[in-house]
Image (tube, helix red, strand yellow):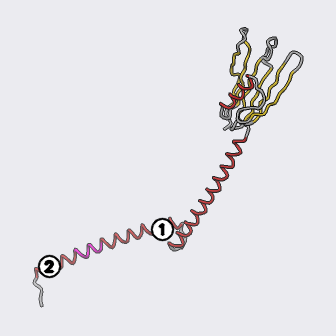
């Protein structure tokens, strides 16, 4: 059986086209394989492991990191609890306790933690003696009677966030109190 020259020419053209297409597909497959190997090499960090061993190692690494993050969270929460109990809110109100005394030598200092627990220290300076008082504070309140200056020091300490404040209060000739800020230390946090 002989092929007619026109049919043979058409078959030859189709065969050449198929060969060129097969060559293109082969080159594309080789390029894809090269990229896959390169990606796998980066992923495996140049180790000779199969995919399952590599994935198992990565899964173990992720689990270890999760455990470490959980442990770090526990430590952070413990530190937060310690900070809540630290004495970080401090305010001092200076004043003249007696009309005949000047120089604002009397003071009340509130030293509290974040919850408002701590103490208020007061020193009352008189002409011949000085008396010092310490009163326990719980949640911003005290079972003891508090002076206006002690209450002011507590209130100001609670309104601050870790700052140390000093206030000066002096009596005006009219008897009213005047409050001014003397100094401020920068926030330590």
Dots 2, 1 in contact, CB < 8 A: no
Can you say which quadrant of the picture contains the C terminus?
top right
Q: Residue at x 77, y 26 (%)?
A: 145
Q: Position of residue 64 (x, y in %)?
A: 61, 62
* Number of the label disc, if any, that sits on residue 152: none
Instruction: State the residue position of label 2.
Output: 9
* Number of the label disc, if any, that sits on residue 40: 1
Looking at the image, is 146 positioned above or below residue 98?
A: below
Question: Which residue occupies the extreme bottom position in the image?
Answer: 1
- Describe residue 123's horizontal placement relative to residue 14 as left or right: right
Observer-side mark, 2 or 1, equals 1
Magenta stretch holds residue 150: no
SS class of the residue under badge 1? helix
Crowdedness of circle 2 by 10 Å Cα count: few (<14), some, many (20+)? few
Q: Which residues are magenta?
A: 17-23
Predominant secondary structure in magenta? Answer: helix
Q: Position of residue 49 (x, y in %)?
A: 53, 73
Can you say which quadrant of the picture contains the N terminus?
bottom left
Q: Residue at x 66, y 49 (%)?
A: 77
Q: Position of residue 108 (x, y in %)?
A: 77, 25
Is tag 2's residue or tag 1's residue first in the polypeptide sequence?
2
Q: Position of residue 44 (x, y in %)?
A: 52, 68
């Amino acid at each position: 059986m002989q092929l007619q020259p026109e049919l043979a020419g058409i078959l030859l053209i189709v065969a050449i086209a198929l060969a060129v297409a097969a060559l293109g597909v082969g080159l594309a497959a080789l390029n894809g394989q090269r990229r896959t190997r390169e990606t796998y090499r980066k992923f495996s960090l140049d180790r000779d492991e199969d995919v399952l061993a590599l994935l198992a190692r990565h899964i173990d690494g992720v689990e270890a990191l999760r455990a470490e993050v959980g442990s770090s969270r526990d430590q952070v929460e413990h530190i937060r609890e310690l900070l809540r109990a630290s004495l970080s809110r401090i305010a001092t109100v200076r004043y003249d306790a007696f009309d005949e005394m000047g120089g604002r030598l009397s003071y009340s200092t509130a030293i509290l933690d974040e919850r408002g627990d701590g103490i208020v220290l007061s020193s009352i300076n008189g002409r011949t003696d000085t008396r010092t008082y310490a009163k326990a504070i719980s949640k911003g309140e005290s079972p003891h009677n508090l002076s206006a200056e002690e209450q002011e020091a507590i209130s100001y300490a609670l309104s601050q966030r870790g700052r140390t404040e000093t206030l000066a209060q002096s009596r005006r000739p009219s008897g009213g109190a005047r409050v001014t800020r003397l100094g401020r230390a920068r926030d330590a946090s």
